[in-house]
Image: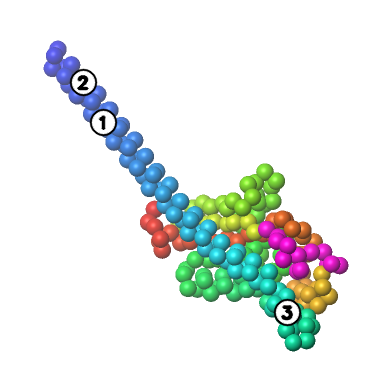
Amino acid sequence: MCSKLIKSSLSMLVLVISISIISNKHAYSQDIENNQMKCLQKLADSTINMLVATRSVIAKNQDLINIDPVTGNYYFKGFVPALVGSEIANDFSLMTGYKLKQTSLNLRNLNNKPDEWEKKILNKFELSKYPKGTGFGEILEIDGRKIYRYMKPIYVEKACLKCHTSKDKTRPEIRKFLERKYPYDQAFGYKEGDVRGGISIMVPLEINFHL
C-alpha cells in the first residue's frame, strides 16, 4: 500500500515537473520571439524614419532647389520627395536585401502601386480610430521564406501642398510638369495632416534572425 502511494506520488510529481518544463519552455520561446519582433520593428521603424526625414528636407527646400539665385526666376526641376524617396529606396534595397517602398491608395507614380498586403494596411491607416504615426508589422511566409513586413503612415506636411493641393492652387509650372510626367495622377486635393500613404519594408528573416 505504501509502495503504491509512493509510486503514485512520484508519477504525479513527474507529471507536474513535465508540465512546468513545457510551460517554461513555451514562455521562454515566446519571450525570444517577442524580443525579436521588437528588434525587427525598431530596425524597420528607424529605416523608414530616415527616409521620411529625407523626404521632409527635400519638401521644405523646394524654393532653394527651383529658384534661380541670380535671376529669382522659378524653374521647377521635378526634384521632389517622392522621386528622391524612390531612388533611395531602390538603392537601399540593392545594398541590403530589404525591400523599401513608398506607396499610396491615391497614386501619382504607377510604379508605386500597393500590393494586397499594403492596400490592407493603408486602409487601416485611413481609419479615424487608427493611432496617428503608428506603424503595423507582422511576420509572413512568402514563397517558403519568413519575411517581416512593416509599414508606417506618411502624412501631408505644409511643404507637401506645393505638389499635392488642389490642381487650381498648384503653380502652373508644377502642374504642367506633373501632368506631363504622370498622366494618371491621383495625388492632388490633399490638405495638411491627411494620410498621404505609407512606406513599407520587407526584411527577410534569414538575414537577421532564425525563427
Q: Nearer the viewer, residue 71 or 16?
A: 71
Chief SS of the magenta region: helix
Mark 3 vs 2: CB contact within 8 A: no
Residue drawn at x 39%, y 53% is 211
Cα distance in 3D space between marks 2 and 1: 12 Å
Residue denoted by label 2: 9
Residue drawn at (68%, 73%) of the image: 61
Indicate the position of residue 91 as horizontal and vertical percent values: 53, 74
Q: Amino acid at mark 1?
A: Ile
Q: With 151 as the anchor, is 9 left or right in this view?
A: left
Compute the Cα span from label 3 to label 1.
Answer: 73 Å
**Label drawn at residue 66:** 3
Q: Is residue 151 left or right of residue 110?
A: left
Look at the numbered disc 2 and give the secondary structure of its residue.
Answer: helix
- On the question of residue 10 being in view, the answer is yes
Task: Look at the image and give the residue range highlighted in magenta.
Answer: 155-169
In the picture of the structure, the residue carrying the numbered disc 1 is 17
Q: Quadrant of residue 83?
A: bottom right
Residue 87 position, x and y percent, is: 59, 74
> As displayed, is residue 68 above or below residue 194?
below
Q: Helix, strand or loop at disc 1?
A: helix
Q: Earlier in the sequence, mark 3 or mark 2?
A: 2
Mark 2 neighbour class, 10 Å CA radius: few under 14, some 14 to 19, many 20 or more: few
Q: Nearer the viewer, residue 159 or 32?
A: 159
Residue 203 pos. (x, y %): 48, 61
At mark 3, the secondary structure is: helix
Disc number placed over residue 161 in the picture, else none: none
Task: Tell whether 17 sits left or right of 129.
Answer: left
